[in-house]
Image: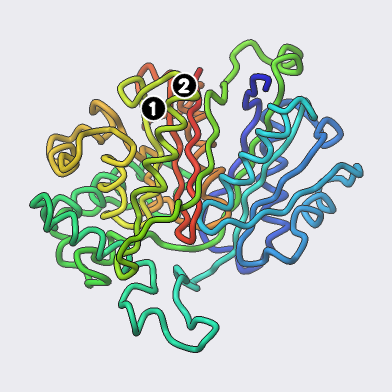
Amino acid sequence: MQDVYVLGVGMIKFGRYPDKDVSQLGAEAALGALTDAGMSIKDIEMFVCGNLFQANAMNGQKILQQIGQTGIPVFNVSNACATGSTAFREAYVGVASGMYDVTMAVGVEQMGKMGLLGGGARSGGESVEGVLGSGLMPAVFGQAGVEHMRKYGTTAEQFAKISVKNHKHSVHNPLSQYQVEVSLGDVMKARMVAYPNTLYMCCPTGDGAAAAILVSEEKLKQFTTKPIKVAASVLTSDPYTDRDLTMPDVNTLTQNAAKQAYEKSGLGPQDLDLVELHDCFATAELLHYENLGLCGEGEAGQLIDQGETALGGKIPVNVSGGLLSKGHPLGATGVANIYELVNQLRGNGGARQVEGAKAGLAHVIGLGSACTVHILTA
């Protein structure tokens, strides 16, 4: 396996684009990455498109119809919320294997106001939501939060502080879907969605796209002297366990992926300067502090109370605004996390720059199941 570097990234502002289609959104992000890398589409040797809700629409090929058809291999991938990050990993593997020197990954989704779909009937007709009470994602992560409260005494206010933090971060991100601060009182008094998550503790959905260009070390020499290295790229799925199926496991996937990523990169959580993790709900972010090893088991509440995960803290988390404020167009999220890390490691974070950032971790989880962890270094 050869070393892999991110040469170019592009992203559009997350929001709602009823006048555009998926291929147009993806093409805009792809062109942005090409410009950033100083390349043209003729330089790309393999293309991967991550899209979930139109997974059978050959969106990768449609994007190339917008920006240039050169006859290269195109892969279309779908992997729940980890769709975009899986596309990035496939582009990574293409270069790491030595098969290609330049690949591109695009994550794109057009969801409008459809919301986070995750329930529905099984093939036999019975409703998962009705039988288990956890067929929809708000209920899954609400239940996981309540379990953490039961075991460790975590409070609803501690979860709410995560929403306050991420919305504050988003004010400095012009590509965030929402750029509005909220107070702790605002969050606590907002409409309850799935206890303890209120409305401001749930991510908005919409439209978005992000792109990344990956290259080999040999190709890198032709373009830049300040590379961003992919130190680890890991994808996991749920291992079989004889567990209580009424309590979906939102932890093991991430724990396994993080362990592998740390081993592959030679880095540990203490070496990270920032993290972009999958805060689909405020409860999820707090749980993943522990799953990623940012603190010990049961200590996540203290981490948020002490401000350690805010910009300026010991380990800033989701300085982009996170999914809670930046938005969560499913297929785009994973590549958007990479976009943020690359800009931070280049020192281009603007008002949200993490001082001296040299190593960052991007994490996405898709229940069903898939989890990616990528570690990037400057």
Give the residue at mark 1.
353
Q: At which x and y percent is residue 76?
A: 72, 54
Q: Which residue type carries mark 2?
A: Gly
Secondary structure of residue under mark 2: loop
Whole-angstrom CA distance, mark 2 to mark 1, is 7 Å
Furthest residue to the bottom? 125
Q: Count numbered badges in the picture.
A: 2
Q: Is residue 275 above or below residue 164?
A: above
Q: Which mark sits nearer the N-terminus, 2 or 1?
A: 2
Q: Residue at x 50, y 26 (%)?
A: 376
Left or right of 131 on screen, residue 66: right
- Could you tell me which residue is drawn at 39 percent across and 74 percent down? 135
- Indicate the position of residue 321 as horizontal and vertical percent values: 37, 45
Question: Tag 1: residue type?
Answer: Gln
- In the picture, the disc for residue 347 is 2
The residue lying at 46 percent from left, 53 percent from top is 238
Report which quarter residue 133 is drawn in.
bottom left
Q: Please, which residue is most extreme toward the front here?
A: 242
